[in-house]
Every structure is written in C-alpha cells, then in structure tokens.
Amino acid sequence: MIRFRGRSLDLRDGESVLECLERSGEQVPSSCRSGVCQSCLMRATAGHVPPESQKGLKPTLVSRGYLLACACRPTSDLDLSDGAAEETSSRVLETRWLAPNVVQVLLERPEAFTYEAGQFVHVVRPADGLTRPYSLASLPSAPWLELHVAVKPAGNMSRWLSAACGESVRLRGPLGECSYHAASLELPLLLVGTGTGLAPLLGVLRQALAYGHRGPIALHHGARNLAGLYRWNELSELADLHPNLELQGWIDDEPGMTGPRVRVGRIDRQPLQSYAPLRNAMIYLCGSPTLVANLKKHAYLQGASLDRIYADPFVTAPALAAALAIA
Ligand SMILES: Cc1cc2nc3c(=O)[nH]c(=O)nc-3n(C[C@H](O)[C@H](O)[C@H](O)COP(=O)(O)OP(=O)(O)OC[C@H]3O[C@@H](n4cnc5c(N)ncnc54)[C@H](O)[C@@H]3O)c2cc1C
Ligand code: FES
C-alpha cells in the first residue's frame, strides 16, 4: 500500500507507483516513464525505497528519500509526498523553425537560474501541468535559454511549444550530467547525436570552445536528410575557424546531395570506428535512445571509460501516457 496526499492506495501486482497514482486519479507529472527524465520525482517519508527507483539521482537526493515514481515498485508500505522540485516562471520569447520539424524555442532566463550548457530542464505547461524535458543549447552567459524541439505529429508539448510565442511556462531543473568539464581541456571530445540531440551537443561544443579547448573535437550529427542537419552553416563556420574541430554529418540515402563534410549512410557505429583514441576521450551521446544505447555499449567495449561517457537518450512518453496527458 502507498499513502499519498492523505489517501491510502493499494498497488496491483507489478504496478509502479506512477501507474497506481494515475489509476487512482491523482495528477502527477511524468514524461519518459522509464526512469530517465526525472519528471516523476517524489519523496518517501516512511518505508523502504527500492534502490532501482533511485538510479541516476544525485546522492543528496537519494539520502533524503527521493525516488522516481515510474521506476518504483515497492515491496512494502511506502508514505510518499510530492517531489517538491522548485519551479521558476519563464516565458516563450521566440519560436523559429530551423528545419521542417525542428523549432528553436527561446525562453526568458529566470533571474538567478544557473545551469551548464547541455543539461536539461523540465518545461511545464501551466494550464494542465504537462511536463517534458528539453536540453539547453545556450551558454550560461546568454540572456535566454535556447531549446531545439523536434515537433512530433501528435506530440502534446512539442506541437504546443512550436506556436507558444508569448506564453508563460514553468521550469524545473536544471538536471543531468551532460555538460563540458573544464578539467578536460586537453582530452579528445567525441560528440554524437541524431536530430535535436544536437541541442545538448551544441551546448557542450559552445562551452568547450569558450574555454579554449585544446584537444581534438569530433562532432557527428545524423538526420534523415540535409534539411535535418539544421545549424549546419553555423557549425561549418566554427569548424573552419577551429582546426581542432572535425565535423561530420550523416544522412539517409539522398544521392548526389552530399558535401565535403556530409556522408550518405546510417550514423550507427561509424563515429567510433573513425575515432581511435577512445580510452581518454570524453564521449557525449544524445538523441535516439537506440543509437545512444548502442554507441554507449560499443564505446565501452572499445575501451572508453564509463565515467567519461555522458548519454542523454531522448526517451519520449509512450502513446498511453500521451493519451492520459490529454485527458
Ligand atoms: C533527458 C531528455 C532530454 C530531452 N531533450 C530534448 C530536446 O532537447 N529536444 C527534443 O526535441 N526532445 C527532447 N527530449 C524529448 C522530449 O522530452 C519529449 O519527449 C518530446 O518532445 C515529445 O513530447 P511531446 O509531448 O511533444 O510528445 P508526446 O505527447 O509525449 O508523444 C510522444 C510520442 O507519442 C506519439 N503520440 C502522442 N499521442 C499519441 C496517440 N494518442 N497515439 C499514438 N501515438 C501518439 C507522438 O507523436 C510522439 O511521437 C528529451 C527527453 C529526455 C528524456
Ligand atoms: S523518470 Fe519517471 S517519467 Fe521520466
């Protein structure tokens, strides 16, 4: 049994805390439903917290009983309270299409909001509490927060955000470890992503260049077609300016459309094969969950150190969750 907001609720066999609360009509934020995005953060005030529900949380949160409701299947009674994650108010300043299905969203930067480029924030729609994580491509010195949003055909948040200029939003975070570390100035950086996975990579790249990174940097971006390699001109200019930056685009079959830095073919494991010194490399993998998982495994098998691999799989809510969010 779980106790939450003054109610006692019985868990069904194998049910997660999130599923139980939703079945019981409680409104709780969620997005990925697979323990990645931390939208469903809650706190246990009494009872045993299953360790798997605290995977990926900072030690300070673990020691205070925080857990992820979507990954929590209690084996005994648990008293729970809302995650009480601090929220700040913001506003959509500008929306601009970067590709047919990618929109850049600039948010007002709340006062005293500190973050590292490449981390992610939870954007909350005030009207109904719909919550989704998005990565930060801007530098902390920028006057706004820059998001790149892939607009999904039936996507609740992405479609709304694409036309939300002037709307208020709330923000939670920042979260995640995907950011540049000044101590790695001399190390090789390998940045690999698909689609809007470029957002956190661009954040890390901008920060690395701002610090004057001296080691080699390789950025691989995969997309369906040339239009999907958005921001390509800006990246090419950066690569022209910085001899230590190698840029490689990957697009699906589009004969005759390649340029000097663009190859036709699936991105797959290619970036690892063409990048030998993996042992000391800082590796950043973002975007398609399948690609991220695959590359992470193979980077490790090829000698990369797990504590130098930063992976942000862009796990989306399954259709059921999306339907619940609309209801
Ligand atoms: C750590 C992290 C960082 C992220 N960073 C970014 C980022 O920088 N940029 C970015 O674009 N994304 C990012 N994402 C993904 C993002 O959070 C959202 O999941 C994504 O934008 C989709 O949200 P949505 O509300 O638009 O779609 P949802 O409404 O959640 O729908 C998800 C999918 O289900 C489909 N769907 C919806 N309703 C139905 C239905 N009734 N029947 C069948 N299918 C349906 C949608 O078309 C969509 O493909 C990130 C995710 C994580 C975990
Ligand atoms: S971590 Fe629970 S919904 Fe994403």
Image (spheres, rainbow, N blue to C red):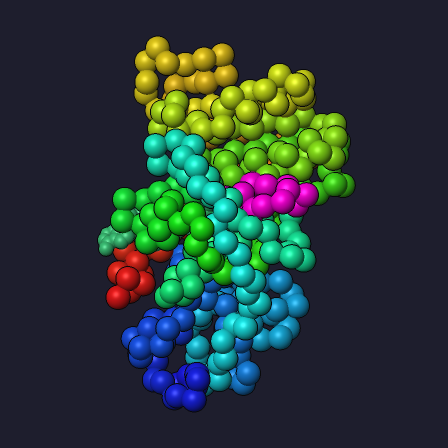
- In the image: residue 210, left or right of residue 152: right
- In the image: residue 243, left or right of residue 191: right
Q: Is residue 274 visible?
A: no
Would you say residue 261 sits in the magenta stretch? no
Q: Residue at left 35%, top 28%?
A: 224
Dominant secondary-structure state across the stretch colored magenta: loop
Vertical comparison of 44 with 289: above or below: below
Vertical comparison of 137 with 232: above or below: below
Q: Point out the stretch of residues depicted in magenta.
A: 136-147
Q: Position of residue 22 (x, y in %)?
A: 33, 73
Q: Residue at left 38%, top 88%?
A: 8
Location of residue 236 (image quadrant): top right
Furthest toward the front, the residue is 166
Q: Decide which of 290, 246 is in the foreground and name it.
A: 246
Vertical comparison of 11 with 267: above or below: below
- In the image: residue 45, left or right of residue 126: right
Q: Position of residue 297 (x, y in %)?
A: 50, 41
Q: Decide which of 25, 113 is in the foreground and name it.
A: 113
Q: Position of residue 189 (x, y in %)?
A: 64, 32
Vertical comparison of 162 with 113: above or below: above
Q: Decide which of 228, 63 is in the foreground and name it.
A: 228
**Image quadrant where one finds the N terminus:** bottom left
